[in-house]
Amino acid sequence: MLFLVLSGIKLFRGLMRMLDEASLSMDRLSEPFGRMPVHPETVSGPGNGPGAPFRDVEMVREEYESGKEERRAARRDARIARKYAKGQPQRVSDLGLF
């Protein structure tokens, strides 16, 4: 009998935890969908200049490296915001202390 009572309590707590997560998910889904990307200036499309075969190799490499750093920073900022919203601890490397 005690086993059934404890199993029922465990099942109830698991159900309540699942419902809390479903509620948080629905809150996130109900946010507006028309948001702009984090860094729209990094998005490039056709017609932004000459194609790759006609450009200077050093300039292309420099643009790639600077874009790479911008994308890393954007991912880091998104990770920090996501962890802050969830109340999770931050990485030491994300805090910029070192």
Image (tube, helix red, strand yellow):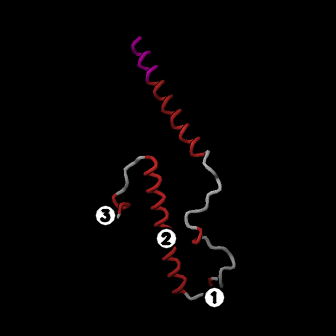
The answer to whether marks 3 and 2 mark residues whose Cβ atoms lie closer than 8 Å is no
Residue at x 55%, y 82% (from the top left corner)? 60
Residue at x 37%, y 50% (from the top left corner)? 89
Distance in Å between CA atoms under marks 3 and 2: 19 Å
- The label shown at residue 70 is 2
Secondary-structure class at tag 1: helix
Dominant secondary structure of the magenta stretch?
helix
**In the image shown, does 85 or 69 lie closer to the viewer?**
85
Query: Of the residues under marks 3 and 1, which one precedes in the sequence?
Result: 1
Query: Of the residues under marks 2 and 1, which one precedes in the sequence?
Result: 1
Within 10 Å of disc 3 (Cα), the crowding (few <14, some 14-19, many 20+) is: few
Q: State yes or no: residue 79 in magenta.
A: no
Q: Is residue 17 left or right of residue 50?
A: left
Within 10 Å of disc 1 (Cα), the crowding (few <14, some 14-19, many 20+) is: few
Part of the protein shown in magenta: 1-9
Residue 5, position as x, y percentages in the image: 43, 15
